Amino acid sequence: MKKYILALDQGTTSSRAILFNKAGQIIAQKQKEFPQIFKGNGYVEHNPNDIWSSLLTVAKEVLLCKGLDAGDISSIGITNQRETTIIWDKETGEPVYNAIVWQCRRTSEYCKELVKAGYSDMIKEKTGLIIDPYFSATKIKWILDNVQGVRERALSGRLLFGTVDSYIIWKLTEGRVHATDYSNASRTMLFNINTLDWDNEILNILGIPKNMLPRVLESSDDYGYTTLIGKGKIKICGVAGDQQASLFGQACFSQGDFKCTYGTGAFLLMNTGSEPVSSKNGLLSTIAWSVGGKVNYALEGSVFVAGAAIQWLRDGLKIIDSAAESEPLALSITDTNGVYFVPAFVGLGAPYWNADARGVLCGLSRGTTREHIVRSALESIAYQVNAVIEIMQADSATKIQTLKVDGGASENNFLMQFQSDITGCNVLRPMCIETTALGCAYLAGLKSGYWKSMNDIKDNQKIEYEFIPDITESKRETLLSGWEKAVERTIL
Ligand code: ADP
């Protein structure tokens, strides 16, 4: 009897392995951080060997710590930092360059050229994405153009490209499988989300040989097996990028279901069902997952600075000692006394789209205390999330009913209540906020027969707390209009 699913969560700063049981509960977990490589000029890299060795170590450790072996594991699910790009030699397994991380801005100039050349509409229509260095396509081109001999080796069929999921699958299967899933493919800016195939026109424009690209499989599918974790074979059956995995882990299976992950930034995804929805407000259309032959799409919007605003109070202003302290401080007063904080440290994203905006703290008086500032920082997270929700509702012509939340800052009760008040919807916080790992575990377990259907997964969902709106409409309008005025002041 197979007891557990093993979720491998390869994140931006650490690799984690988590064992889940049938009820979707965590049985054991191990985590290992690995080095970040900052080279200046906005260059961010990871050493692929660090990614792989940290992940393999935690995978082995989590089995060992429970005295388990391969035979106890029904299957492996993989979720990963998205867009990060690796190219390696298929004979030697050696990467030709470091992994170029999603945050890396080295291809900004080239992206501007693509925009100037008039490719924006075509790329948005085909891939659902806005031309940006964030996505894998221009990172691949950079390696082909800048690392000596790589283009020739790629053309001769020696090299493989993969996002982090592909690289891990290839390593786990010792080179037998070169594949990715629809959700990760849809973040490369090379994948046509309508025809569900790599796009020849975009590949030609960027000069990327098609033979480097992985096969694209369903998110719940047969990805081969590994013999590297414990004695015996374990099947790999689930793969999804981190934000899509968390949408699945929150059981947002129906059209109109929403989730928000409150981490350093905040990521909002809305299930748009079997058709991609094209945003008029700069949101991304992306593939959420493909399960049982059915592709599900999502709209995605993000807030650049969410939990990071609280980090700044702690590390920059030094007015709090821990992120958790922000909650009692905010609750110790009844309002911000007219103080608004807009943490536009790196400009503002959707729906404002102003890269030159900078942060403001306004409405200060002699009576302003650190409590007011702390509360205004927490409120700013909710206002920004609310602004993205409003445009998602407009783009999809769907009214949000409930918002499912996860991520570190979702533990803050004040923030969650304020989100519910300001958005006017119920906010549901699940028992298990490791929804990313849970999502890929579910995808794997559905394929390996550990869970029979998506209904089994829905039955597993346990809500830890439900926040219900508790302010008057006029109060809400007053608060929102104050926020909009503060946003106007971010333009210097
Ligand atoms: P990431 O995955 O982006 O590293 P996490 O999900 O681990 O993020 O969440 C960490 C972020 O959440 C940090 O920016 C931190 O400031 C914020 N955070 C953590 N706990 C709280 C809390 N109780 N209240 C407010 N913010 C918090």
Image (cartoon, rainbow, N blue to C red):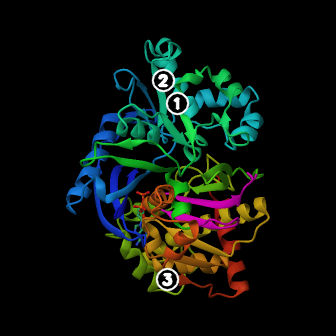
Above or below — where is 342 with respect to 401? Answer: above
> Which of marks 1 and 3 precedes in the sequence?
1
- For image coordinates 51% across by 62% down, the residue present is 306
The residues tagged by marks 3 and 1 sit, at their Cα atoms, a distance apart of 42 Å
Foreground residue, 48 or 130?
A: 48
> What secondary structure is found at the residue carrying circle 1?
helix
The residues tagged by marks 3 and 2 sit, at their Cα atoms, a distance apart of 47 Å
Which image quarter holds the N terminus?
A: bottom left
Foreground residue, 49 or 307?
A: 49
- For image coordinates 68% across by 40% down, the residue present is 196
> What secondary structure is found at the residue carrying circle 3?
strand
Return the residue at label 2: 143
> Which of marks 2 and 3 precedes in the sequence?
2
Q: Position of residue 466 (x, y in %)?
A: 54, 83
Q: Residues within 10 Å of mark 2 (few under 14, many from 20)?
A: many
**Disc marking residue 465:** 3
Above or below — where is 103 with respect to 199? Answer: below
- The amino acid marked with disc number 3 is Tyr
Q: Which residues are magenta?
A: 252-277
Q: Position of residue 123 (x, y in %)?
A: 71, 35
